[in-house]
Amino acid sequence: MQQTEQTIFKIVKSQKEFFESGATLSVSYRQRALQKLQDWIRNNTDLLLAALQEDLGKSRCEGFMTEISLVLSELKYLRRHTASFARPKRARISLAQFPGKSFTLAVPYGTALIMSPWNYPVQLTLCPLADCIAAGNCALVKPSAYAPATAKILEKLITSLFPREYIAFVSGGRETNAAVLRQKYDIIFFTGGKTVGTLVAETAAKTLTPVVLELGGKSPCIVDSDADLRLAAKRIAFGKFLNAGQTCVAPDYVLISPQVKDKFLQALKEEIQALYGENPLQNDSYPHMINEKHFDRVTGLIDAEKVYFGGKSDRSLLKIQPTVLDGCTLSDGAMQEEIFGPVLPVLTFSSFEEAKQLIEKNANPLALYYFGKQNADRFLREISFGGGCINDTILHLASHHMGFGGVGESGMGAYHGKTGFLAFSHVKSIFVRKGGDLSLRYPPYSDKKLRSLRRLYR
């Protein structure tokens, strides 16, 4: 159901008034809200899993592992640590501040807009919402219209737990998106594609509204000559074909040393068959593409002459078989855009410098994965990317103790755990004067004072 702009305006206005009342500043208030959210999810997990099955064809196990478990873990962590995060943090003073004390204080921005995507509609809605609540903000939540079953459950969750002036939910397509973005917020958190993300950033810039953008890009997976090929094949197959490749940090393509390519491809084929069977199109645990538009886009990237494995699809089921393309170059269609589907191009590289040049053709990927030992440090230090793994895929984002986010073309800002709390907070720097101060700071200024100052900073 589309929301009118007048309705959205009233929601945002009421949230600004509610925030100004100071109700959300109480740590206990935030913790109770997090507890409500956690309890509801635990009691209604089956509803969420059924919705994910309907929208994306995710099995109950995959839905719980990649969505519900991460949200519950985030909520539990934040409930335990919000009080600590919200306390003033002592800071050392400089010479100019003596005598006195300094501290920092994280305070909420105020009203937040959270726009979430369709590919992980539970996790990518509720994890940032949990961070937002922990930081003490109000929030307007706008999920993607492409996952309607999940959006319906999320609406039920939010409207049953929270007053609209605190946490509100709006649904709809492009018209609603445009109406939502015409309002003034104190922070915008957006997860999605680069095109819409750029529009969000442009809109926010007009009112100097801070943004966190979690986008995507072509995330490379490098397999070096000294890699454990069987392990690399298994973990790449897992990361790539999870959610049928509809994952922002999925390995987008493989760069491999030519001397191990043939052995790797054979191992990859065997691992895919072990994960999804001989006929993945009939495997109920293998997800489908979100809609016909994305099905057609991804199948259009498959060059039949370069199919090493897979290549089959069924439009009636919206399913595309896990597909590996061999002998690819940067001119191939699959290398011109983020694939966001179960198609994996394989290219070769002969040196670190060549691999770097290939990666920089699609600069600043959200993730980078390296399998091997000899060049790991160079890939980490010399290539710009959001985050990644050595000898694994995906799992760098499954931690409260590290922030997750992009850089450059793949986004800005980060979240998860304390990083997420701080993403929705402004950190104030405070200095408290104690007693007297240095007379050198005050006019009249003279050469004598200058000599004294220079001696202090030798």
Image (cartoon, rainbow, N blue to C red):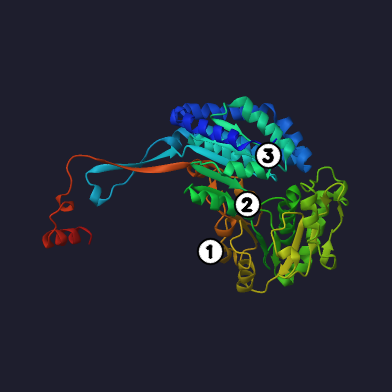
Instruction: Find disc 3 in the rendering and name its residue.
Output: 172
Of the pair 32 and 276, the residue shown nearer to us: 32
Contact, mark 3 vs mark 2 (Cβ under 8 Å): no
Helix, strand or loop for disc 3: loop
Q: Residue at x 83, y 54 (%)?
A: 321
Between disc 2 and disc 1, the foreground one is: 2
Looking at the picture, which amino acid does disc 1 mark?
Arg
Of the pair 405 and 317, the residue shown nearer to us: 317
As measured in the structure, the alpha-carbon distance from the residue carrying label 3 to the one carrying label 2 is 15 Å
Which is nearer the N-term, disc 3 or disc 2? Answer: 3
Q: Is residue 354 above or below residue 390?
A: below
Q: Residue at x 58, y 64 (%)?
A: 379
Which is nearer the N-term, disc 3 or disc 1? Answer: 3
Contact, mark 3 vs mark 1 (Cβ under 8 Å): no
Q: Which mark is residue 381?
A: 1
Q: Is residue 232 above or below residue 30?
A: below
